[in-house]
Amino acid sequence: MHSSVITFPGSNCDRDMDVALKKFGFKNKMVWHDDVELPKSDLVVLPGGFSYGDYLRCGSMASKSKIMKSVLNFAQGGGKVMGVCNGFQILVESGLLPGVLLRNKYLEFICKNVFVKVNNQDNSYFKDNKKEVYEFHIAHNEGNYFCSNDQIKDINDNNQIAMFYSDENGNVNEQSNPNGSLQNIAGIFNKQKNVLGMMPHPERMIDPALSGEDGSLFFENLINNLR
Amino acid sequence: MKVSVIITLKKDVLDPQGKVIHQTLDGMGFDNINEVRQGKYFEIDTKETDKKKAEKNVEDMCKKLLANLVIEDYKIIGSE
């Protein structure tokens, strides 16, 4: 399985993602934002960070960079594209995913472990996943998912919510919502479910000595599903 | 020609920064405020000399990059 991680100026989780993908069997290539063509890929990942210093709006500049034309084509042809944190922000700004990520409700940068409940297993990312509730790490200032009434209706009608912020037992409620996200949304798909954007960082949970293993479960399952 | 445009959050979008600014102003003694909404201002110096064309061009920029129409509105407030 071949993967590509795009590095934008200001990306800072690109190497963590590279380590994670390789650990679970992907042959990963790092791709610079100014490149035009994507290498042969089964999965393209837009990593976390602060692309272009979060100028204008988070992800807005990166969504117009050269490589994104190829990423858009790849995604529109059914290719798997995953955006984590700033990568999620880039995906919504590019129009591949609906909505927008606003500043966190209480204006704080949030850096902590949270629980997320997987909502939809009918896709390559979560099919046959071993757990319903994962413990992942979040670190963001703009993770407050928002969209119009028409968009949220569409999202629910098409079962596009990938995961909700929840408590340890999978209860989705206001107490388990760290940033004010609409309906506790932590991650969403496009209609075809080949594009996934999520605020939590699975690549930070791949080593029991450092953090935890829920990210390992996610990546192991992902590569098995793509094979 | 310079075209000026302001971008504001749509009415029904929560503006936590505006809220905090409101509270701070309140604490400073400006206690007659109903609401504060924060926005962005751009001044775009374009080579275009025709006012209509310049404004049309900036409108296009707003739609494609400067504003996110899910949450923001734009308004061209002048060109000279």
Image (spheres, coloured by chain):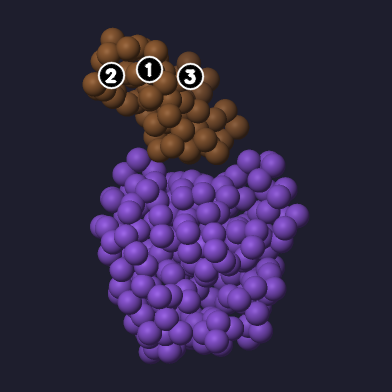
Chain colours: A purple, B brown
Please say if the residues under marks 2 and 1 sit with CB atoms less than 8 Å apart.
yes
Q: Amino acid at mark 3?
A: Ile
Please say if the residues under marks 3 and 2 sit with CB atoms less than 8 Å apart.
no
What is the chain letter for disc 3?
Answer: B
Dot 3 lies on which element? loop
Left or right of A130 in this view: B56: left
Q: Which residue is mark 1?
A: B53
**Residue at the image position 54 percent from the left and 30 percent from the top:** B10
Q: Residues within 10 Å of mark 3 (few under 14, many from 20)?
A: few
Question: Based on the displayed image, in which of its 4 quarters is residue B29 positioned?
Answer: top left
Earlier sequence position, callout 3 versus callout 1? 3
Q: Does A108 sit above or below residue B66?
A: below
Residue A136 visible in the snapshot: yes
What is the chain letter for disc 2?
Answer: B
Earlier sequence position, callout 2 versus callout 1? 2
Earlier sequence position, callout 3 versus callout 2? 3
Q: Position of residue A163 (x, y in %)?
A: 62, 66
**Residue at the image position 63 percent from the left and 41 percent from the top:** A148
Q: Amino acid at mark 2?
A: Glu
Q: Position of residue B57 (x, y in %)?
A: 38, 24
Q: Out of A147 and A165, give the one closest to the viewer.
A: A147
Residue A104 visible in the snapshot: no
Q: Out of A43 and A172, give the one closest to the viewer.
A: A43
Q: Position of residue A65 (x, y in %)?
A: 33, 52
Q: Residues within 10 Å of mark 2 (few under 14, many from 20)?
A: few
Quick one: quadrant of the C terminus of chain A?
bottom right
Q: Which residue is mark 2?
A: B48
Q: Which residue is mark 3?
A: B33
Dot 2 lies on which element? loop
